[in-house]
Image (cartoon, helix red, strand yellow):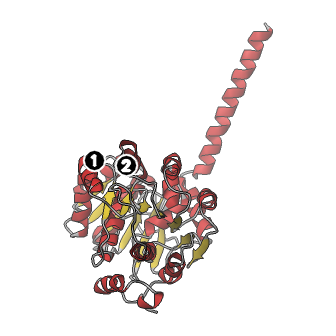
Amino acid sequence: MSFQALGLNSQLVDAVTELGFNTPTPVQQQAIPQVLEGHDIMAGAQTGTGKTAAFALPMLHRLLETENTDKKANAIRALVLTPTRELAQQVYDSVVSYSKNVPVKVAVAYGGTSMGLQVKVLKAGVDILIATPGRLLDHAFVGTVDLSRVECLVLDEADRMLDMGFLVDIKRIMKRMPAQRQTLFFSATFSKQVKTLAYAILNEPKLIEVTPANSAADSVEQIVYPVDKHRKRELLSHLIGARNWHQVLIFTKTKQGSDALAKELSLDGIKAVSINGDKSQGARQRALSEFKDGKVRALVATDVAARGLDIEQLGFVVNYDMPFKAEDYVHRIGRTGRAGLTGRAISLMSHDEEWALRAIEELLDNRLPQEWLEGYEPDPTLAPVDNRRSSILEKRRAKAKSKIHKNRGRRLR
């Protein structure tokens, strides 16, 4: 099947052909016809399978087919909401490349960059706006963007937006939009909370799942290395150095942890940079550019970067810290093995993270292979986290009971 066979505008087909895309991916084959027919959809597919084109191409087609009768300069016709700046920029770049042959104006708005420059662009007139919820509301409050004429709304990675606390912002945005519109949900995972929100705002949506929900791509080889927590950095440096890994994306749980690990890797002779929510947008973009260009060997990131990083031929993703939410594991390892290429996902698991592995395996409905590396075997005398937690809880309960009894005794006296 070709993009032309899906019924897309010939100029859009020419654009994707010039980009080297000739055959639609499964999610594109299923979603594009449904969007062209005007249906609301809820589509789930693994990262790297072409979700952006699956909503952007038919959205552009419909805008071209419908004459814009609204002459208000700040009234946009289509809105794409994303949870992170990186994903907003990635979607923007893709939509611009798809629309280069057609008279459609595209803009992006997110925090960490000049509000003034964005205001200037929006006042000049925009058809499609890609934005993060917070910055979009900033523009809506000051009147630089009008959402009352939106014909199509896309929520990209809706589950992550809910995880990041954007539900209230999303509801505020919805109130400013017309009830009669097309709404599209796209994500690699769908939690119960997301499905509840989706069915509350979608109109008889078409459900599209090209792969089992919450699954990892077959192109990604996964392995878990049990190791004591204090030896994780040592093992990571050994793996990168001894196996000559390049372009390694490493995930940590905290911002401070990402900065500290990047410094420690650099001391080990492995050039590394970090990217997290505390960094300015300029610093984040510089770090990402250096990583993509091969100037640094490792990029250490928090989950803020799990959605929106599109790095060609990224070979390795390392979970230095196991993710708190099992769904984030799917998004993390989805940064590799993209566009038909193969990749490796390595998880360094300490005793106190065994619960996270169980949650991931339950989500994937699959056991992940484990391997002890010689010289880095975990100390079997360390108590599992569950036992330690039980012991701590028992001590706390005993202390609380003792306090209650003492207070009762005082009252009786």
Q: Are marks 2 and 1 in contact (CB under 8 Å)?
A: yes
191 lies above or below 243: above
Residue 145: image location, x then y, percent: 37, 51
| Neighbourhood count class around disc 1 (C-alpha, 10 Å): few under 14, some 14–19, many 20 upward | some
> Mark 2 or mark 1, which has the lower sequence index?
1
The amino acid beneath tag 1 is Met
Q: Nearer the viewer, residue 201 or 66?
A: 66
Residue at 37% across, 89% down: 22
Point out the residue furthest to the right here: 412
Q: Give the Cα separation between the discs numbered 2 and 1.
A: 9 Å
- Find residue 202 and report its image quarter: bottom right
The residue carrying mark 1 is 115
Residue 262 in view (yes/no): no
Q: Nearer the viewer, residue 9 or 378?
A: 9
Q: Nearer the viewer, residue 263 or 9?
A: 9
Q: Nearer the viewer, residue 221 or 268?
A: 221
18 lies above or below 360: below
Residue at 28% across, 85% down: 18
**Residue 325 placement, left or right of 239:** right
Residue 250: image location, x then y, percent: 36, 62
Point out the residue furthest to the left here: 295
Is disc 1 placed on a helix, strand or loop? Answer: helix
Q: Name the mark on residue 290.
A: none
Residue 327: image location, x then y, percent: 53, 62
Residue at 64% across, 33% down: 396
**Residue 37 placement, left or right of 387:** left
391 lies above or below 221: above
- Find residue 14 and report its image quarter: bottom left
The amino acid beneath tag 2 is Arg
**In the rendered view of the protein, which quadrant contains the C terminus?**
top right
Residue 140: image location, x then y, percent: 40, 47
